[in-house]
């Protein structure tokens, strides 16, 4: 039986942008894991560091593709820069997945409506993120986005997602507890601010994955605001750990703000992540 989803976006190895991330993701993981070994960490910690490094690269790339869908090079920049945030601390992969899905839903880059399986998946991701380093705010904001974008499935999926985020926090999470930003976190923020200033300039013209309509600039602009709100919410909840948890998304959003011209219209699958 074929499971229908409005969120999935396959990685197509025939596309240059997709080939890039398929190559860079494991290389980033190997580099991050090797760095931890050289720093004296155990093999298990090095393996986990490698997973985080590769995940940071891929998720920063994927977030940037949602926020700047007609310029693949900006996503490549995000993927190259994201693993460096591990110097400030460990990101939350579940929290980053919530930010990515929230951006995808809001921007409407797939062109498909949400199905019941999507509602269940969103709630599970929000539950895990709420229990982890990102806190409940990103999941709650994703629930609001679902309710706004898809009035049919969103009537159930939106409140369920927001409730799952707070349930995960109530059962297993911590905070809110502000922790002041240290040197490493301030480096991430200050490096991202100049590029973030450019995210208000939204380009358009690329088709959705369905190919029967173009991605709308207004929805991409709302997606950028959602990502910024998720990062701000996690930071307000935890302080420095919250910022570090979603710092690859901050890098991806900052890369989307770099100036430059959009490329020629692509095939719908070239937006795949």
Image (cartoon, rainbow, N blue to C red):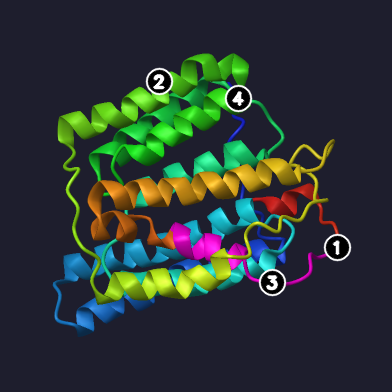
| Secondary element type, mark 3 | loop
Nearer-the-camera pick, 251 or 111: 251
The residue tagged 3 is 259
The residue tagged 4 is 2
Residue 225 spot, x, y in % from top left: 55, 47
* Circle nearer the viewer, 4 or 3: 3
Residue drawn 62% across the image and 28% down it = 149
Range of magenta residues? 249-264
Residue 127 forms part of the magenta stretch: no
| Secondary element type, mark 4 | loop
* Circle nearer the viewer, 2 or 3: 3
Residue drawn 19% across the image and 53% down it = 178
Task: State the quadrant of the N terminus.
Answer: top right
Mark pair 1, 4: CA separation: 34 Å
The residue tagged 2 is 160
The residue tagged 1 is 264
């Amino acid at each position: 039986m074929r499971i229908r989803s409005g969120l999935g976006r396959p990685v197509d190895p025939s596309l240059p942008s997709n080939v890039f991330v398929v190559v860079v993701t494991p290389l980033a993981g190997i580099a991050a894991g090797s760095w931890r070994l050289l720093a004296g960490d155990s093999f298990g910690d090095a393996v986990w560091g490698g997973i985080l490094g590769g995940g940071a690269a891929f998720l920063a790339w994927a977030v940037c593709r949602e926020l700047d869908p007609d310029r693949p090079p900006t996503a490549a920049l995000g993927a190259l820069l994201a693993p460096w945030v591990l110097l400030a601390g460990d990101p939350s992969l579940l929290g980053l997945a919530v930010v990515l899905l929230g951006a995808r839903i809001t921007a409407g880059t797939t062109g498909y409506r949400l199905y019941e399986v999507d509602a269940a998946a969103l709630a599970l991701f929000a539950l895990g993120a709420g229990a982890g380093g990102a806190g409940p705010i990103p999941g709650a904001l994703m629930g609001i986005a679902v309710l706004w974008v898809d009035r049919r499935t969103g009537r159930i999926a939106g409140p369920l997602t927001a409730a799952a985020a707070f349930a995960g926090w109530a059962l297993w999470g911590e905070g809110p507890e502000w922790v002041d930003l240290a040197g490493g976190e301030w480096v991430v923020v200050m490096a991202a601010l100049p590029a973030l200033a450019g995210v208000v300039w939204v380009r358009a013209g690329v088709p959705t994955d369905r190919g029967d309509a173009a991605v709308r600039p207004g929805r991409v602009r709302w997606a950028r605001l959602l990502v910024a709100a998720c990062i701000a919410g996690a930071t307000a909840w935890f302080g420095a750990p919250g910022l570090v948890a979603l710092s690859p998304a901050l890098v991806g959003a900052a890369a989307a703000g770099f100036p430059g011209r959009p490329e020629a219209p692509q095939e719908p699958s070239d937006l795949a992540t």
